[in-house]
Image (cartoon, grey):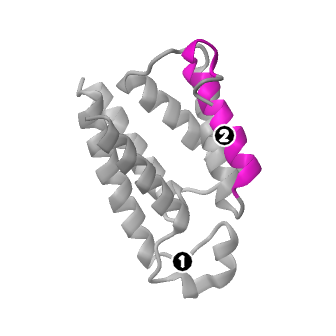
């Protein structure tokens, strides 16, 4: 996909990633994660690189799209439990003129804490909602994926 991106357009790359994820990932999280990348791609269209403000804005639009599509919010034991706090930290880092690596470190930490918080919650969305109280004691897989994505972004930004 990197080689196919015209002029190294970040938006094209993110949209292509969303399309690829949608066509290959199953479960409830596959289409949801694809929507994150597709929304990010729309917001980044025409950009050749991203600064911390761009990334915060793009991921905020992605989070809004997820909420619009499925209605999930923090506390519902979904990927939003990790995504929303990570985006909030990234936006705060941008507002405080922190570097991209510092902002991603903070966002990764917030995503990890949000992910861990899902252990005590009952799933209210996705396939896990049918399991009710049986989901207590387990981390939400979507939240784990978001925490892993932010940890990877933070690690590779240094």
Q: Is residue 128 visible?
A: yes
Residue located 65% across and 75% down the image: 129
Estimate the spatial distance between the alpha carbons at disc 2 and disc 1, rounded to whole Å.
28 Å
Name the residue that disc number 2 marks: 18
Residue located 33% across and 49% down the image: 108
Q: x and y percent of residue 138 in the render?
A: 47, 79
Q: Is residue 55 magenta?
A: no
Q: Is residue 13 magenta?
A: yes
The overriding secondary structure of the stretch rendered in magenta is: helix
Q: Secondary structure at mark 1?
A: loop
Q: As rendered, which of 99 and 135 lies closer to the eye? A: 99
Instruction: Tell whether 78 sits left or right of 26.
Output: left
In this rendering, is residue 68 above or below 91? below
Quarter holding residue 113: bottom left
Identify the mark nearer the N-term, 2 or 1. Answer: 2
- The boundaries of the magenta stretch are 5-25
Name the residue that disc number 1 marks: 122
Residue located 36% across and 26% down the image: 52
Quarter holding residue 123: bottom right
Disc 1 packing (10 Å; few <14; some 14–19; many ≥20)? many
């Amino acid at each position: 996909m990197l080689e196919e991106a015209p002029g190294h357009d970040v938006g094209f790359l993110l949209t292509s990633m969303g399309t690829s994820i949608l066509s290959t990932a199953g479960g409830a999280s596959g289409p949801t994660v694809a929507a994150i990348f597709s929304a990010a791609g729309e917001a980044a269209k025409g950009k050749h690189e991203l600064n911390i403000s761009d990334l915060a804005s793009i991921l905020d639009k992605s989070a809004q799209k997820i909420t619009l599509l499925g209605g999930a919010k923090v506390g519902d034991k979904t990927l939003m439990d990790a995504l929303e706090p990570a985006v909030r930290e990234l936006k705060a880092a941008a507002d405080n003129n922190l570097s991209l690596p510092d902002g991603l470190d903070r966002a990764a930490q917030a995503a990890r804490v949000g992910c861990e918080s899902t252990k005590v919650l009952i799933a209210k969305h996705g396939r896990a909602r049918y399991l009710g109280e049986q989901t207590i004691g387990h981390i939400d897989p979507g939240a784990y994926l978001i925490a892993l994505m932010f940890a990877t972004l933070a690690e590779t930004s240094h």
